[in-house]
Amino acid sequence: MKSYITQLRGLANGSQTLMQNMVAKIAQEVDIQPLSLYYFHAEQEADVQLNSRLDGIIGGIEANDTVIIQTPTLMSSNYSVMLFEKLLALRQMINIKLIAFVENICGQPKKVIERYIALYNNCDELIVSNQRVVNRLKEYGLSNKRIIIFDYFDYEPALAVSNSAEFAKQINYIGEKPAKLDKLIQTGYTVTSFYKQEIENDLIVNKINQNGGFGLLWSDDQTIDENYEVASPIELGIFLSAGMPTITKRKYACAKIIEQKHLGFAVDNIDEATDRLQTITDDDYHKMIKEVEKVALITRDGISIKRALIDAIFQANLPQMD
């Protein structure tokens, strides 16, 4: 009995593909093998050719194996639907166990979410980042109650992080810097932005750690902002693995755990963040660093995701009681 996890290859799409690749990497460390999906524009592919292509991908799956499908697949609708249908057919015919790993699905269009709900309701287990995602999916018709929630989106750095972050007037931001962050610059803080190509660089954790200061999880883009309200973004995992206290909006899903575990602080707006930064002392910062380093031991080794994957496989393969 083997376990597999889908991994999209051949597409550089910022944090979304980074997330999938990181989950697949962590999965291999607990003997879950990659099921590679190679990105191409499948919209024009004839059904007979696409059918043959997908048969080749899943051809090695045997009776009682477990397949974890990372969603969204980031492939075209016809590709995704046919893949779902084939995996669900194998579930019926040879008793494979099917698990969906839910990643940033709430940021997708309504039609896409509804398509995935049909898959989720027929899975043996779902792996979800937090309860807010579950609640949002229920609004679209999710009825499956077999759900495992993990604590953090882990991020394993390519190189070991050997030093604690230093207190500095430095803000580390992943993505295109919003204009509002200029207010932080006016108070003497330097804002360093890490763009798409740097996000995909294995050394991003080490660079942020060396910069010191704070991570900032923030967006004024409506789509990203709304997604952060329910999602647990990998950007937070990057900051935590860098040993970096994080500033975030109070309305974001991750704000609760940041404040409860003293991993930074949450605010309603940039003006409030500016005020807080001006009052933080060296002692305050190092108290946060101490708590962040505890969590970093988890995120740097993929512990949260490993535990969720192992629990999901175990639960999916337990005999079901009528």
Image: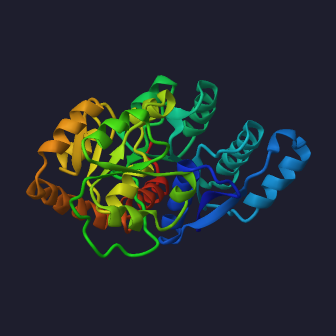
The one nearer the camera, 127 or 299, is: 299
Of the 4 image quadrants, the one containing the N terminus is bottom right
The one nearer the camera, 272 or 66, is: 272
Q: Residue 238 vs residue 284: left or right?
A: right
Q: Can you see residue 94?
A: yes
Q: Quadrant of residue 82?
A: top right
Q: Quadrant of residue 288?
A: bottom left
The residue located at (68%, 55%) in the rendering is 94
The colour scheme used here is rainbow
Q: How many marks?
A: 0
Q: Residue 318 vs residue 281: left or right?
A: right
Residue 122 % position (x, y): 57, 39
The one nearer the camera, 270 or 157, is: 270
The one nearer the camera, 26 or 226, is: 226
Residue 101 % position (x, y): 51, 49
The residue located at (29%, 62%) in the rendering is 243
Q: Quadrant of residue 164?
A: bottom left
Residue 130 % position (x, y): 37, 41
Of the 4 image quadrants, the one containing the C terminus is top left
Please say if 61 is above or below 17: below
The residue located at (54%, 67%) in the rendering is 32
Q: Residue 213 vs residue 305: left or right?
A: left
Q: Can you see residue 133?
A: no
Residue 192 % position (x, y): 40, 52
The residue located at (34%, 72%) in the rendering is 161
